[in-house]
Amino acid sequence: MATRLMMFDLDGTLVDSVPDLAWAVDAMLRDIGEPEAGIEQVRLWVGNGAQMLVRRALTKSMIPGYVEDDVLQSAMERFFHHYQQVNGMNSRLYPQVRETLTVLRKKLPYMAVVTNKPEQFTLPLLDQLKLPEFDLLVSGDSLMAKKPDPAQLLYCLNAVGCRAGEAMMVGDSVSDIKAAQAAKIPMVCVSYGYHQGEDLSSYQPDLIIDGFAQLLLKE
């Protein structure tokens, strides 16, 4: 069945946003008198949403322990404050992304970004990147649920009138895979991105690609 709708995760799939996230994490840690984590450590922590990133930074652990609610809330506010200032400044598209999306835009009826990133950060980042136009943008706070729940993907299907077999999800994480599988949508994983070193093949996506341009062989 021909693909009519292709949905893309943002961070870790289209763009490497770790430099900006790391800057914001380190600024937050400085605010509360903790040592900076550094970009390489933050790169290992990202991939499960902002709150998990902040919890990992506060506990210096991949599997964070208990953090008091008021401490977490204050740290989240500081993190968002700093990230708002730097969002998009040092983030970079992964190789072949712009060129591939330009070709796909001419071939596909519909393209969408489906991300767990809050809209207040998603829109400025997309503006900075100056990518080809997307028909739909579903952010982490657009609906009541977000990936790995399939709600965002199902919303896109309904919005453009596509069946699951006419769509494709492209992402880099276990959350992307689980959301696509729950929605019965074919799933393509990029081998780079933010998945904490997990073996994505064990989650049985339909395809794993090493370069973004390989999508031109699958659309």
Image (tube, rainbow, N blue to C red):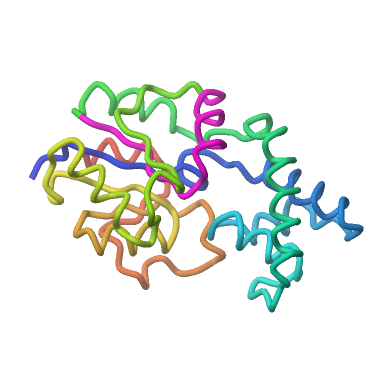
Viewport quadrant of the C terminus: top left
Q: In the picture provided, is 41 more to the left or to the right than 140? A: right
Q: Report how many numbered discs are placed on residues in the image.
A: 0
* Residue in view at x 28 percent, y 57 percent: 180
- Residue 171 locus on image (x, y percent): 39, 50
Q: Residue furthest left?
A: 1
Q: Quadrant of residue 69?
A: bottom right
Question: In the image shown, does 194 or 145 lie closer to the viewer?
Answer: 145
Where 4 falls versus 176 (above or below)?
Answer: above
* Residue in view at x 30 percent, y 48 percent: 169
- Residue 144 locus on image (x, y percent): 38, 54
Question: In the image shown, does 157 or 191 lie closer to the viewer?
Answer: 157
Identify the magenta region: 110-129
- Residue 195 locus on image (x, y percent): 51, 61
* Residue in view at x 44 percent, y 53 percent: 172
Question: In the image shown, does 198 or 181 lie closer to the viewer?
Answer: 181
Q: In the picture provided, is 157 more to the left or to the right than 94? A: left
* Residue in view at x 56 percent, y 28 percent: 124
The magenta stretch spans residue 123 = yes
Viewport quadrant of the N terminus: top left
The magenta stretch spans residue 58 = no
Q: Quadrant of residue 136?
A: top left
Where 73 falls versus 60 (above or below)?
Answer: above
Q: In the picture provided, is 124 more to the left or to the right than 65? A: left
- Residue 141 locus on image (x, y percent): 45, 47
Q: Quadrant of residue 207?
A: bottom left
Question: In the image shown, does 63 or 19 lie closer to the viewer?
Answer: 63
